[in-house]
Image: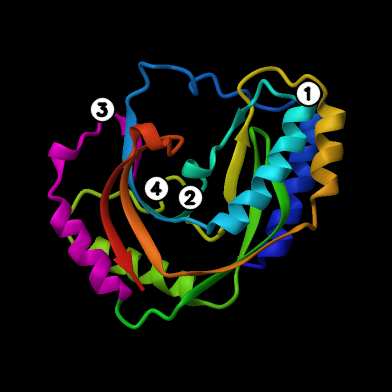
Amino acid sequence: MNLQEHYDQLYQKSSKAILEGNYIIDNQINDTADTRFGITLLIRPGDEIKAKIQLFLEELKEVDSNQYYYPNSDIHITGMSIISCYEGFTLDKIRIEEYVEIIQKSLIDVDKIKIDFKGITASPSAIMIQGFPTDESLNNLREKLRENFKKSDLEQSIDSRYAIATAHSTVMRFQEKLENPEKLIEVVEKFRGFDFGEFTVDKLELVYNDWYQRKSNTINLADLYL
């Protein structure tokens, strides 16, 4: 996949939808009865990059403060969604150590992963930072995870929603009607090619999480070092 082309196409389609009022509001963000949980292997960018992301979000907040903005604690890249969030999933349904074992096996011979955060894209319901792995290491890890989990009889739903191939980070979701879609897109355009920085992944986190990866609802199951 050509990631830049993918992000560009997504942005063109989504920015048009946003400007035409055809965006999607997430009505479940503030639903305290939301029981969608799952297990994710995720990557977190460093503090320097997160500080730059917050500068971007501050500008968005000046245009529309009523949307859902990710705090630094929740910003992440999905390495692999092992069990996609579904209603009623709880940790007592699995043996965590068996999942850790497969992930550790998948990490053997995986080179250092580097990701370049550059520019902004969008979906009809969110604003995202574009992430670009600098080589095939992340893809190689994902392929090994697919292969090893599919060989096992553990509960998993890898690629059930879509086959993950990107390295983006969602940083804002629409939770209410947009106050000014034109000004929102103006700010996004300003940061369309902004360089948020490159970082080397030295640790992956296996977490039990809600749909939004909120820290308050996240349980760290294991840290896996590269």
- Closer to the chain start, of discs 3 and 2, is 3
Q: Which circle's residue, 3 or 1, is located before the other in the chain?
A: 1
Task: Determine whether, in the image, residue 82 is placed left or right of residue 90.
Answer: right
Q: CA distance from mark 3 to mark 1?
A: 33 Å
Which of 215/144 is in front? 215
Q: Position of residue 93 (x, y in %)?
A: 14, 39
Say the numbered circle drawn on residue 160.
4
State the separation of the CA atoms marked 3 and 4: 18 Å
- Indicate the quadrant containing the C terminus: top left, top right, bottom left or bottom right: bottom left
Residue type highlighted by circle 4: Ser
Tell me the CA gap for discs 1 and 2.
26 Å
SS class of the residue under badge 4?
A: loop
Three-letter amino acid code at the position of disc 1: Gly
14 to 137, vertically: above or below = above
Residue drawn at x 40%, y 37% is 215
- Mark drawn on residue 6: none
Q: Which residue is mark 2?
A: 162
Which mark is nearer the camera, 1 or 2?
A: 1
